[in-house]
Image (spheres, rainbow, N blue to C red):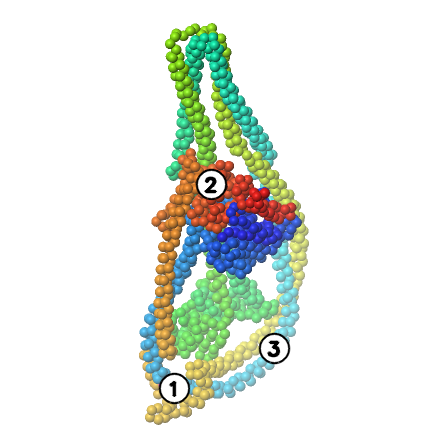
Amino acid sequence: MHLKTLTMRGFKSFATATTVRFEPGINAVVGPNGSGKSNVVDALAWVMGEQGAKTLRGGSMADVIFAGTSRRPALGRAEVSLTIDNSDGVLPIEYSEVTITRTLFRAGGSEYAINGTPARLLDVQELLSDTGMGREMHVIIGQGRLDEVLTSSPEERRNIVEEAAGVLKHRRRKEKTLRKLEAMKGSFTRVEDLTAELRRQLGPLAKQAEAARRAQVIQATERDARARLLADDLAQAQARLEAGAAEDQRTAQLREENQAALTQARAALAEAEEHHARLSPQLSALRDSSERLASLEERFRAMDELARERERTLSTMPARGGQDDPEELQARAVRARAEEEELEGRVREAQDALRTVLTQREETETAESAAERAYNQASRARADARENAARRAGKVSAVRSRLEALQAEVERVEKDVAAARQRVQTTSVQVTDIEEELVATSAGDDTLATTHEEHTRAHLAARAAVEEARANEARAREEMARLQAIVDTLALSLEPEDATAWAIEHGAALLRDHLHVERGWESAAENALMGAASGAVVDNLDSAVDILRGAAQVQAGRLTLTIAGGKNDDAAAAAREAALNAAFETVRPDPDAAVHALAVVSGSQSGSDLAGLLTQLLAGTALTADLVTARQLVSAGAPRAVTRTGDIITACTATGGEATAAATLARQAAYQEASEQLDAAATAADEAAAALRKAETAEEDARARAEASGSELTARDSNLAAATAQLGALRQALSAARADEERAVARAASLREDIAARQAELDSFAEPEEDTADIPGDGELARLSQQRDSAHEAAVGARKQETEARLALRTAEERFRALSGRADALDNRARLARERIEREERARQIRGQHAVLAGQVAAGAVRALAYVRSLRAEVAERRRRVEEEQHGAEGQLTHLRERVDQLRTRERELADSTHARELATARARMEYEQLATGALEDLGVDSTTLVEEFGPHIQVPTEDGAVPYVRAEQERRLATAQRALARLGTINPLALEEHAALEERQKYLAQQLDDLKKTRADLLDIVAELDERVTLVMKAALSDISARFEQVFARLFPGGEGRLIITDPENVLTTGVEIEARPPGKRVKRLSLLSGGERSLTAIAFLVAIFMARPSPFYVMDEVEAALDDVNLGRLLEIFRELQRSSQLLVITHQKRTMEIADALYGVAMREDGVSTVVSQRMSELREQ
């Protein structure tokens, strides 16, 4: 199995359809930076189901669609198709080639397809997971993936191992199954509870079924007796209705005569009032104009003061705060850039000096070798000359001279050995000191790093606390705004109507403002007050008449007034209240079902007038929760009952039928409650704001501590890096010193052997030595010896200069790197400072313009104020003249109103008489209607039929025959049946059917519950077997990968040591995987102290170990060797060749050596229109050429 083709359409920079055909083996993708090489890797990850936009180097998934250039418009969708060769059947699908297609539309839609058939993302992931390629995408090593592997948690590394081992899919399925089982637990418990509840209900329901059978017989007797009694009541009520008709006709004739006289008096009064009414609107208009002008005068005065204050505020310019000077920052940037250039020049000088020293060292070493050869040649020539003169004497003299020279050379070499040993010792001590310092710093608990991590966690926690506090404040503000809107709405709805508002302005008060009603009874209390609750209240009758007269004059509208100081009929009120008490004693309703109106309605101010008023209005009134309770109380003698829905029931009348809207008292109670909640919400909002300020202060402190500890940790790591660099230089110097020592020791040993040989040769001559003082060539030999010594000293000095030059170069480079970028940072700060100064200047200009505008507004307000004052004086004069004319018209109205009042009094007397007759008639009619309604509701028979079939004229059938109707007998018969039913208790007429249905349902649920228990046990057994299997697979995978990691690490770091540590060997399903790496020559094992190349190689070693232990069909690597030198690159390429044997490799690279081992090259280039193109070349074709 291997990748065959990749087709991209509209994906990132590949705007046009581009197809890349891959070859088995190593495929290298090359091209300049920015040409779109990495987009090929992104396309592979995307088509295989990658869901992270950041992984694809974007902010959102829509960023993968070609965004357009200056020459090409943006596209509406991106499509990538990947064709995989499945001839070996690795993929579990019956196709030799498998094409996976993914399409993303800019509108947000996404589609997957497998061989042209629509599929889901889960289908694609399941298809690939069987080959070791899953959601973790460990086979694709993109940019930054190596560092991500090292910085990831041990558990995240375990996920990569699980994916490679092929168990991640099973783990996900197991977790999904366990989540479903956990979710099912609540339903399971509910079914068990429901089954138990059904078993518990079956027993009582069986008893109810038996009682229902007995109740059927008793209910038939009770219904017959009740029907006969009700028919008797209906017959008597009908007789009372017919008796009151004649009285109603006589009273109507008297009212007609009085009405004619009242009409004549009203006509005269209307003519007089018409004249008076014409004056009232004029006076009212003048009063309104005066008030409006006074309001305008006050508004213009306030506007003038506000404008002048605004002008003074805007004229005062805020002082600039102490900020950075851009010119100073620019000068510092110039100095920093000059210093940077100077250091760069020093680096170049140090490099030139190093090259010069290297040349000198090579020259001195060449000169040393030449001087040595010249001296040896001179010595041999001198020996030959003396041998010709006197062979034996010459040999002796030559041997002695050679011995002296060798001894001098031995002394010089021994000095070199001692000097080299001294350098070795000194350098070794320095190396040991630095290594001990590094080990002491990195070994054991890293207190500074731990402190920084704690501070970082504290900062994150403080930031989360700030976000939570900010959300709490927002919620509190929203709640306060919501309650404010409710309060405003309720306040607006409680504003009195036009006529009531006029009465309030002229001495009346709202009755509801002086009432207190217990919660829940507001609607019933308002209906009991018969509209008075929403009207006004006055102290006495005179005030009421004055207000009514004034309201009529101004045509304010219809008005209802309640008189608090009127005459009270305490005896009648007490009688009504006594009747209500008796009714409560008879019915004994629940406290939540009925209450005395006077018990829940009271005055909120002291004084007997309001209490007496409430007594007159509410005495004998019961407030009930429903009509059933109201009927019981009225039937028991209560004068009046009012329900919460607005129904009013008396013995003679019944009003209602439809639930009323929210009452005024209910709205007022809601307004008071909302106001209290608003105050509490405001307090909560202030507390939330204080908590937010406290959390922000804590977050700032935590951030400062985290930044401080981070700076310390960075400085510590920088010091460690510098020490590591110094350690490397010292190790090089140590190696050079040891090499010098070894060469000097070898040279001394060689010289001693030569001295021993020459001494043996000298001892072989038996004759005494001859004087060789006059033998020619001694001076020349001494000169050559001196030249040889001088050349050797020069070579040693040149090597020392080389070491010093290397150290100087390294020091200059470190200083240059430390200063790099400082000038650019200072330039950026200077630019920001200039922008800040420009913003402040623009703000000053705007403030000046606003100050001028405020002055103009103040001047206009002064002119308007003077004009309003003149108009107000003119209106006051006109108002005075109209008031005088109105006073004269009022005297004429007084006489006419007295005549009308007398006729009205007679009209009210007749109306009261009519009303009393109507009440009696209505009471009788209501009684009849109640009885008819009761017959229809209780018996299901209309009143006419009931009287015809069960009236008093119908005989009562008995077991002994029919007998005449006797009311007392039927009442005893009804009471006997009711007592029998009462002894049976509550009867459930559907008990028989309910018992059978409940028993059937209980059996069904018991069977289903048993099936659920068996299924759940089977699933848990499968999960246990799966855990056991996955544990075995993971143990084998971790073991193989650990062994492979040690092998690969040893190849990439010869002499180094690396291993994988299993954090929890006892539980491989939740264990983590730690990486421990120690490159050769270092004692540190922390990954953060490794160099960039070492970190890259360590991550590569981990991934390659996974690749070797659990191979996948292909791997994609994006510039993984970018940070490696030639030596490490060669080691990595050898591993690539090994992976090539079992897998296909796709490598994004800039390295020439990587390209040389590739089987195919793919060149990616960016055209002028911003679209990437690809060209390919098989390397085998080039090699054949």
Q: Secondary structure at mark 1?
A: helix
> Looking at the picture, which amino acid does disc 2 mark?
Leu
Segment tinted magenta in the rendering: 220-224
List the residue tagged with mark 3: 265
List the residue tagged with mark 1: 224
Q: Quadrant of residue 317?
A: top right
Q: Nearer the viewer, residue 58 or 548?
A: 58
Q: Secondary structure at mark 3?
A: helix
Q: Quadrant of residue 34?
A: top right
Q: Residues within 10 Å of mark 2 (few under 14, many from 20)?
A: many
Which residue is at a point 58% across and 56% down the rendered structure image?
105
Residue 1021 pos. (x, y %): 35, 60
Q: Residues within 10 Å of mark 1 (few under 14, many from 20)?
A: some
Q: Nearer the viewer, residue 798 or 938?
A: 798
Q: Are marks 2 and 3 in contact (CB under 8 Å)?
A: no
Residue 776 pos. (x, y %): 49, 8
- Mark 2 or mark 3, whichever is nearer to me: 2
Residue 787 pos. (x, y %): 50, 15
> Looking at the picture, which amino acid does disc 3 mark?
Ala
Which residue is at a point 50% across and 20% down the rendered structure image?
369
Q: Are marks 1 and 3 in contact (CB under 8 Å)?
A: no
Mark 2 vs mark 3, CA separation in Å: 118 Å
**Mark toward the start of the polypeptide (2 vs 3):** 3
Mark 1 vs mark 3, CA separation in Å: 62 Å
Q: Are marks 1 and 2 in contact (CB under 8 Å)?
A: no
List the residue tagged with mark 2: 1097
